[in-house]
């Protein structure tokens, strides 16, 4: 089976996937695809339009009518929803709390996976990060990695990330949200968080983002 020129980076929230994936893509000159941002954009739209989160049919319909685009500016990733920049809006705690609802709906995941594959297949090389990239989205990716880390370290990373965006969220709320996210990601029936059998596991607990990037690149060069 032909391998796709893609680098799949999976792992739980706070494991450092986004930071690492961006830098790996930058160094290789590859397209960076933040799959989580795509689900966040759709979640933001559902909140903004007052869509009932218990109405699965309405949420699926929303996913079929939404235009989500990711733009790499070189230094950052901009997320556009129906041609509008929503990069900042999709990072609120309300979006974070509700994104797991949409991510657990099979038909929505099908629509998103189709879009993610299209992005990857039209590029000369891509780096995708999420929960099921190596197992569902690109099971034929040339390189697969699974990042993990100590729970308390992951909480601190997420807390610092929100603080850097001037979002004042109690650390207890971040901790409770991460517990809920982990449980939802692992137990959902469609596209659960899972390490691909052929993925390289990287424990990021005691590593800087730069060290993780270097380790991933060393494996790719081999």
Image (cartoon, helix red, strand yellow):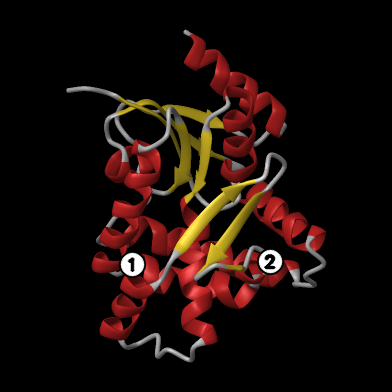
Dots 1 and 2: beta carbons under 8 Å?
no
Camera-side residue: 194 or 9? 9
Q: Is residue 138 left or right of residue 184?
A: left
Q: Is residue 161 left or right of residue 11?
A: right
Kindly give the residue lying farthest to the left in the view shown.
Answer: 1
Q: Nearer the viewer, mark 1 or mark 2?
A: 2
Coordinates of residue 195 in the picture (x, y in percent): 36, 38
Q: Is residue 136 above or below residue 174?
A: above
Identify which residue is drawn at 33% across, 45% down. Answer: 117
Earlier-in-chain disc, 1 versus 2: 2
Q: Is residue 183 left or right of residue 90?
A: left
Q: Which residue is mark 2?
A: 88
**3D distance between C-alphas at marks 1 and 2:** 23 Å
Kindly give the residue lying farthest to the top in the view shown.
Answer: 222
Identify which residue is drawn at 73% across, 56% down. Answer: 161
Q: Quadrant of the N terminus?
A: top left
Identify which residue is drawn at 56% across, 74% down. Answer: 95
Name the mark on residue 140: none
Coordinates of residue 126 in the picture (x, y in percent): 46, 33
Coordinates of residue 209 in the picture (x, y in percent): 69, 33
Q: Answer with the quarter of the image where residue 191 lies.
A: bottom left
Coordinates of residue 165 in the picture (x, y in percent): 78, 62
Q: Which residue is mark 1?
A: 104
């Amino acid at each position: 089976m032909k391998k796709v020129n893609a680098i799949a980076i999976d792992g739980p929230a706070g494991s450092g996937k986004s930071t690492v994936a961006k830098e790996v893509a930058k160094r290789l000159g590859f397209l960076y695809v933040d799959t989580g941002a795509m689900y966040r954009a759709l979640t933001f739209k559902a909140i903004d339009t007052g869509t009932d989160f218990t109405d699965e049919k309405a949420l699926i319909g929303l996913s079929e009518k939404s235009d989500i685009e990711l733009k790499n500016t070189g230094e950052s990733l901009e997320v556009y929803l129906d041609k509008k920049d929503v990069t900042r809006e999709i990072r609120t705690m309300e979006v974070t709390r509700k994104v797991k609802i949409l991510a657990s709906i099979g038909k929505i995941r099908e629509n998103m996976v189709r879009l993610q594959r299209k992005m990857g297949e039209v590029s000369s090389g891509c780096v995708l990060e999420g929960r099921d990239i190596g197992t569902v989205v690109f099971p034929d990716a040339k390189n697969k990695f699974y990042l993990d880390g100590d729970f308390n370290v992951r909480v601190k990373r997420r807390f610092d990330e929100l603080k850097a965006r001037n979002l004042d969220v109690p650390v207890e709320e971040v901790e409770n949200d991460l517990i809920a996210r982990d449980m939802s990601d692992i137990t959902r029936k469609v596209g659960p968080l899972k390490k691909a059998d052929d993925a390289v596991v990287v424990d990021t607990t005691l590593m800087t983002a730069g060290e993780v990037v270097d380790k991933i690149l060393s494996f790719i060069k081999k």
